[in-house]
Image (tube, rainbow, N blue to C red):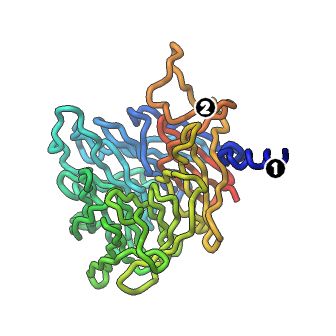
Amino acid sequence: MLLRALLLLCLVPVSLYADWLPGKAYKLPSQYTNQESGYFSIIEGHNGKLYIGSAKYGVNGYLLEFDPQTEKTTMVMDVHEVIGSKATGFAAQAKIHTRNNVGASGKIYVGSKQGYPEKGESRDLYKGGYVLTYDPKTGKSEHFGIAKAGHGIISVTPDEEKGVAYISTCSDDRPIDHTHFMILDLKTKQYTDLGDMEQMYAFIVVDYLHRAYHPKRGGFVVRYDPETKKLEQLKITIDGKEAPKGLTKDNSIQNWDWSPDKKTLWCVEMTTNELFSFDLTQKGETFDGKSHGKLLDVKSTDCRAMCVAPDGRVWMAITEQGRSGGPLCYLASYTPGAKGVVNHGPIKVANPDFTTFTTEDGKPKPWHHTMRKEKDGTLTPWQPLGIAATKDAVYVLTIAPFTLMKFAPPPK
């Protein structure tokens, strides 16, 4: 009987037996989004506050500031106000979708992009996205004009020491998204186009030698050296072998972040269920990476939220897909040099009364559908899109409803 019981236990999904990881939830203001949506646009500023982008389709994009001390959220950038626009519909700057980054000055760098055309709307209505900065010290915002006509901005990475920022644009075409790797001169506000990388949702990192890296369709990385003005195309390999299909397929979505010393690039492809690292000090014509194994011991995953903490740990909010009880989100981490990724368990809302999920007449609120109540009453979100790790906490950004979850102190 004992053997039979053990066999039955092994057949039950692990997630049903994992201890829940509680996080405090904060409802982000609904007036800055009309579909309770934001993306991977979250970063900690030098002042310890979080800066979060939101999407209000057909209307405008906003940058929000969350203060962990007061637990208050304030709108600090109205994109249309900064650029002087009253555009609506598909012509609007509907999102701040960029991976937010912070310059040495403390300025927050973001970009605006297009939403989705409604029936009858032409894509020609959208004139192009803007690179913008917000300075927490002065409370002032600045824009740097349209980078490329008709394209939104999906990535902005500053290198203020060199007086530039590196940009990735997005045409939002499918199946191939045309994404131009560009250099912005922060003084003259002029853009230099380094070419079409055709890599959707690209992230850009800058290494310890000020070289900028951009992924390219087909399993390549393009590296730009500002000293030589040279652009190199490097073929990705993993552990000295051909890269897995996840990194070479046309719809590969590679979440990148780099180590505090800027000598290691960390990468998670959205659906590949594997963590990779790349040594940014390596030489040669290939870009050889290392696999650190599975993110979760499940059949199918979706990971759109990955970041590197100040202490060098890699953090990921990962959704288990194909689960019989519905998708489930886990918080996981990897410590450089460890044998593998640590799964800290499925996440739950520690304060389920953080917002209301029904209207006055008792009907479910619209755009609240990715926060599910389990049979035992546990409230759990399953669609994480952003993550930020500080020395004191890990924050996960989820949507529908637009919610920030805080895990403090960070799990060990």
- The disc placed on residue 69 is none
Please identify the quadrant where the C terminus is shown: bottom right
Specify the amino acid type for callout 2: Lys
- The disc placed on residue 373 is 2
- Give percent across and percent down for residue 317: 55, 52
Residue beneath the point at 31% across and 42% down:
94
- Give percent across and percent down for residue 102: 44, 61
- Give percent across and percent down for residue 9: 74, 46
- Left or right for 110, reference 314: left
SS at mark 2 in the image:
strand
Residue beneath the point at 57% across and 39% down:
324
CA separation in Å, label 2 and label 1 = 34 Å
- Give percent across and percent down for residue 70: 60, 43
Q: Can see residue 127?
A: yes
Specify the amino acid type for callout 1: Leu
Q: Is residue 259 above or below residue 137?
A: below
Q: Is residue 267 above or below residue 360?
A: below
- Left or right for 412, reference 222: right
Please identify the quadrant where the N terminus is shown: top right
Q: Nearer the viewer, residue 383 or 273?
A: 273
Q: Can see residue 184?
A: no
Q: Nearer the viewer, residue 326 or 72?
A: 326
Which residue does the numbered mark 1 point to in the structure image?
A: 3
Mark 2 Cα shell of 10 Å, populated few (<14), some (14-19), many (≥20): few
Total numbered labels placed on residues in the image: 2
SS at mark 1 in the image:
helix
Residue beneath the point at 31% across and 50% down:
112
Mark 1 Cα shell of 10 Å, populated few (<14), some (14-19), many (≥20): few
The residue at the far right in this view is: 2
- Sequence-wise, the earlier of marks 2 and 1 is 1
The residue at the far top in this view is: 361
